[in-house]
Every structure is written in structure tokens, then in C-alpha cells.
Image (cartoon, helix red, strand yellow):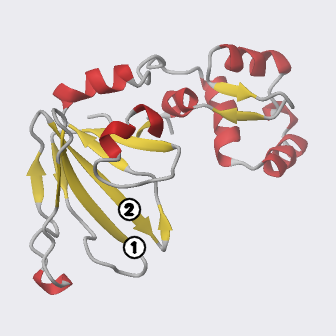
Amino acid sequence: MLEGIVVPSKEISWLTERAFASSRREVRVDVTTSVTFHNTFWDGGSKNEYRAVRLADGRSASLETGSSPWTAVSEGVTVDLVPGVAIVERSTFCGKVQPLRVHLHPENAARLLASAGVLDHQEPVPTRDYMVLRQWVELSSSGRKDEWERYPENRPSPEELDSLVARGLLARNKAGAMSVTTAGKNAMRGRK
């Protein structure tokens, strides 16, 4: 199944806001037929919370976790997703709130992801384009500068950058600063 598809949160806020309030700009979507609940109680500053949302009317229900970790009724339980219901997961890892994760049944995924505009760049990106996108995702601006000084062959040409901007994988602001778009992050998905 598809995992980790990045979607702008405003595109599916009608779904995520029914479950949790979030100020993050992106949501991760997993297309799957089952979900395993884990870390439902605080442990070392980390915790996951789950809510089911019915897609037809937006009604939501919380997961019953029990009163303590040793009586956890849902920890480690795997449930099958049914069409028409999404599971929204809110994770806190080491005290930092992570982007929401939405678990969707395959029957619902195509319609929701197409309406969010994330299925446009499903063809694999060429290796060189992947390397350039990866530099923007994994390195800070000073890190890219250091990388390019050490390995000049890794510096992208202006034509390569213009091509990625034209294809919507990179965005360039008025000052010339560049960032990876949601489409660029999704184009990188599945590559190592």
C-alpha cells in the first residue's frame, strides 16, 4: 500500500479538523487496509492518539485506551479499515508534535487524493533530479553550500533548478530562495 503521501493540510482540513486541531502545514496519508494502535500512553515524552472519522458526515469517535498503560485495551490491537472511515493519528515524539497522519482505505484514497491534487507527480523522478530534491529536503542552506564546496559535481545547474521549478517540484520566491513543494516531496517517496 502507499505510505507517507504528503498532502497540504488545507486540502483535507475538513477531515482532519474533525479529529484534532493542528497548525502544521502538511498531513501524511497512508493508504492501507488495517491500522495497528501503538504508544497510546505517555512514554518518554511520546504518545499517539487516534480518532475515527466517518467520511460521509464527518462524525468522529475517540479510541478507548483504558485508564492506565497496564490495562490498555487498544495497545497493539490491529483493526481493519472499512470503506467510508478514516483513522486520524496525532503523534507526539519526544515532546514535539508531529504532522497528523491519516489512514485511508484504498476505496476512499483515490477520490480524496485526486481532489487534493497529490496524484499529479506519480512518475518516478530521474536520479539526478532526486539528488537535487534530496539536497533541499535534508540539508540546510549552509549545509548545501558546504556540500557544493566539497563536491562541486553535486551543485545543480541553473537549468536543472529552472526545470524542477517549471515541473512544480521546487518553488522559488521573489527573493530567489527555493524550497521543495508538496509535489516534490511526493515525487521523492519510495526512493532511497
Amino acid of disc 2: Ser
Which residue is tagged 2? 91
Q: Residue at x 21, y 39 (%)?
A: 32
Amino acid of disc 1: Ser
Q: Residue at x 10, y 52 (%)?
A: 79
Q: Is residue 141 above or below residue 107?
A: below
Q: Residue at x 34, y 71 (%)?
A: 47
Q: Residue 8: tell me if it is visible.
A: no
Q: Position of residue 73 (x, y in %)?
A: 9, 73
Which residue is tagged 1? 46
Q: Residue 57: tell me if it is visible.
A: yes
The numbered mark at residue 103 is none
Residue situated in front as seen by the camera: 91 or 56? 56
Residue situated in front as seen by the camera: 4 or 52? 52
* Residue 170 figure quarter: top right
User: N-terminal of the two: label 2 or label 1?
Assistant: 1
Q: Secondary structure at mark 1?
A: loop
- Does residue 165 appear to the left or right of 18 in the view shown? right
Q: Residue at x 81, y 15 (%)?
A: 159
Q: Position of residue 131 (x, y in %)?
A: 66, 33
Q: Position of residue 147 (x, y in %)?
A: 82, 45
Q: Residue furthest right?
A: 149
Contact (Cβ within 8 Å) of mark 2 with mark 1: yes
Mark 1: few, some, or many residues within 10 Å (few <14, many ≥20)? some
- Does residue 132 appear to the left or right of 40 in the view shown? right
